[in-house]
Amino acid sequence: MLVLRVLQSGILHGYAIAQRIHVLSSEVLAVEEGLLYPTLQKMLRKGWVESEWGVSETNRQVRFYRLTREGRSQLKAELSSYDRITQAIQEVLRTA
Amino acid sequence: MKELFRQIYYLFHRRRLDEELQDEMAFHREMAARSGRKNFGNPQLMRERAGEAWGWTWLDRLVQDLHYGARILRRSPGFTFMAVLVLAIGIGINVTAFSLFDMFALKPLPVRDADRIVRLERRSPNAYTSEMAYPSYEFYRDHAHTLSAAIAVFGIPPMQLDNDVQPTPVSFVTPNYFTELGTIPALGRMLDPSRDSSPSASPVVVITYFLWQHRFDSDPSIVGRVIHLDGKPATIVGVEPYDVATLGGQGPSIWIPVAQQPYFIAKSKVLEDWTNSSIRMWGKLAPGVTAAAAAQELRALTDAIRRDHPDAVWKDEFIFISPGGHLQVMQPEMYRVAVMIGVLTLLILIIACANLGGLVTARAVARQHEMGIRVAVGAGRWRIFRQLCTESLMLAVLGSIAAIVLAYIVLRITLAQLDAPKWISPTPDWRVLLFTVVATVVASVSFGFMPAIQIARQKQHKTIARQILVGIQIAGSSVLMIIASLMMRAALHALYTDPGFGYEQIVSVDPHLSRHGYSNSSSQAYLAEMESRLRATPGVLSVSLVKMPPLGHVTDRETTEINNRKVMIYPNWIAPEFFQTMGIPMQLGRTFHPGEKNVVIVSQSFAREQWPGQNPLGQTVGDDPDKSTVIGVAGDAHINALNDDDAVEQYWPMQPGDMPDMVIILRAAGSPGSLTPTIKSIAGNLDQSVFPEIRQLKALYLQNVNGIEKVAGIISLVGMVAIAISAVGIIGLVAFVVTQRTKEIAIRIALGARPGAVLSAVLHQFLWPVAIGIFAGITLAAFGSKLLRMVLFGIDNLDPLSYITAIALIGIMIALAMLLPAARALRLQLATILRYE
């Protein structure tokens, strides 16, 4: 979900995705490559993201990932269910 | 769906994509290294994990397993060869049997609309005939809307072609036969309804390719040639194609339009006679009509015939429809035979699998070390189990390929022997291939599954599995051997025992007077003259008349129940000299007086069944007004049911109405064949247009026995193969046990055990399986062989001699198979072994 969300704002390559999440979460969350790449492969398989070749900021050939239409709707679905759950948890925390 | 496409795309480009991923991850690490992180973990492992997301790992593993399995099988060529051989035989026999069934009963004839062709036969709850009267056929043809075509085939005795010595088989047929089947002639034209339907058309014939080749030397200008059949000229208009497909797989050498029947058979009234059942009827269902719908309509038509011609239809008669677009129109009895053969061949497969199971289990011990290493380096049980199953499947696939080749060779030979129609080919079709695939999977599961579980759980020392496998093999072999020996006994019995009548010197002479328009009185005159001239011929001992001649073309039978036992009664109508001529002994009473009525002679078995312990003479058969008194009891002679032990006979005095159907039989003093010219010349003097069918009973009888002998031979061969397979398997198992227990045996011998005691220690574990296996085999065979009664020629299906022979043979084989390897234990070099240990 986080990967999808990060990709919503633009196309990125693998390392940049990890960096972005790391930075945006104020360095709380660190996405290891052991997790990131299987996830990206799975998303390619599911058709949520597409990949294309580009040149990185260090002038190296690298693969960039772009969110597809299906990816967007998947993100939407995941965000709404996540919202529901966090809300529910919040309710419990506040009232119990 | 799209996801699947992407998966498949990945599969085909995986090498490139994998490299890309590797590149990408390398870039990630470079970047990470710049920002100061050092701990990367195992890049190879991570890449594999990422690749797993595509869900193709199982394929990788399978390829690995296949490579590994191939290596293992290559490394033990002896085992691989044995296993493939055993499987090839086990599966091959099944594939062969199924292919034959497929050819005869499943493969559609290569004719137009084969799926709509049906065979139509007269049935009633207690009567059955494969033939019907021509006028009935016409009635069905003209009135049935559910049939788009109706075809009649009218088989007659062979006719004399020009001046040939041997008669040539001919058939009358409705000309639509070939247009409906879509037969394309090799030369000229086939029969054609628009030209050959009228009796006034000029007489034409179509000949087979074989006749054209062999009788007419493939004469290219054959079309238009005039030939003479029984002296009547006819023009050849066409030659059948080489690979012609005929209905029911049968065909004569010459086809004649049925409208010409009165021309060729002078004065015949068969085409107008509602009570003379002599044609075989085939039909083609109208498009979209089911057989059930057609049956319903035909039933109504049968009732309509009954109103106008009560004689032509039986009580409760109906037309039985069976699919006709195959080589063999299957009757229920044939399915029973097919099932029986299927069970026997399946038994071989079971034996083969049990055998291999034993070998695989034994090998497991040799591979204990290997498995230990694999487990130690982290292979899971599941993975090992899968690896072993892959190996079994590879063996089974190799075996199946060999089996298909084997089956192809056997079928080629069989087809050549059987003189099968030329369009049949031994090449497997999709049904056979599907069957082979199923057999392969079933086989690999049944011989590989159990051992694989055991090995994967590392518990291969269980003797019980071995014992079960030995038991199964022995039970299966016992069944096959017992059945083989029953069949052998039956063949010998049939060959060397008196069938109840003297067949060797008998000739039957069938003038087919009813087909030549003879009346009762003219038939009587013809037959009487013929009889007296034959009696005057030197070398003729005795002459008589009979309606149903021995081993004849037609039989008449009724099914009844006597004391809850199903009995087939074969009635016959005879002249008084019948018993003397046939050499059937009179057990009690006397034969008929000429012209006697309301009397009957029954066979010994009938008398015994019907009136046990009473005097049969003076008892009555039937109800008024046909009530008849028993005046004699004749010996059992199944003249029209050689193979049926349940058959009984009733003989009635012939009546004037039977005369046109009577057949002359005579007993010759010398060689019966030498009488043929004399009989022909007598017939020629009496009536030029009648050509009697002359048959030597001995030849017919031997033909019948020959068939049984061949079947018995094949079954024995199969039985021997089965027993050989099990013997090899047992040798392997015992040898394995000996090897496993070498140390123990050596210590026993060193401590002074006697050879007998050592042997019994080794073989002890096989004692019970063998005993139980043989017992189960006998039980199964005893039940199963009930189905065989019909072909056993009067041998009881529990015939003790056959059972004892079979069991003795198996016993010897097993004993040898066990003692040979076990004896090795006794010759062990004690010192070497003990030092080695």
Image: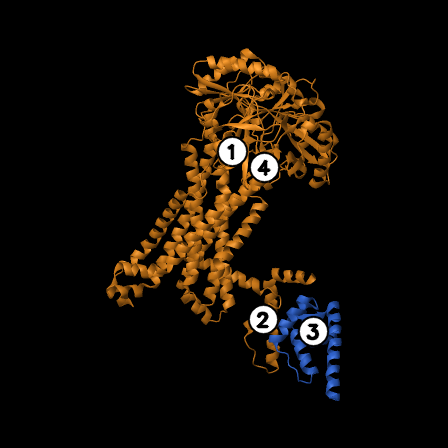
Chain colours: A blue, B orange
Q: Quadrant of residue B1?
A: bottom right
Same chain for marks 2 and 1? Answer: yes
Q: Quadrant of residue B10?
A: bottom right
Label 1 is placed on what type of residue? Val
Seen from the viewer's position, the closer of residues B377 and B205 is B205
Q: Distance between the residues labelled 4 and 3?
A: 72 Å
Q: Position of residue A87 (x, y in %)?
A: 75, 82
Mark 1 or 4, which is nearer the eye?
A: 1
Is residue B359 placed above or below B343 in the rendered structure?
below
Q: Position of residue B473 (x, y in %)?
A: 43, 53
Which residue is disc 1 drawn over? Answer: B648
Which residue is disc 4 drawn over? Answer: B328
For the C terminus of chain B, the image quarter is bottom left
Which residue is disc 3 drawn over? Answer: A12
Crowdedness near tag 2: few (<14), some (14–19) or many (≥20) residues, C-alpha within 10 Å = some
Give the mark nearest the N terminus, 4 or 2: 2
Q: Distance between the residues labelled 3 and 2?
A: 22 Å
Using the image, name the chain to which the residue with label 1 belongs: B
Using the image, name the chain to which the residue with label 4 belongs: B
Is residue B795 placed above or below B453 in the rendered structure?
above
Pointers 4 and 3 in contact (C-beta within 8 Å): no
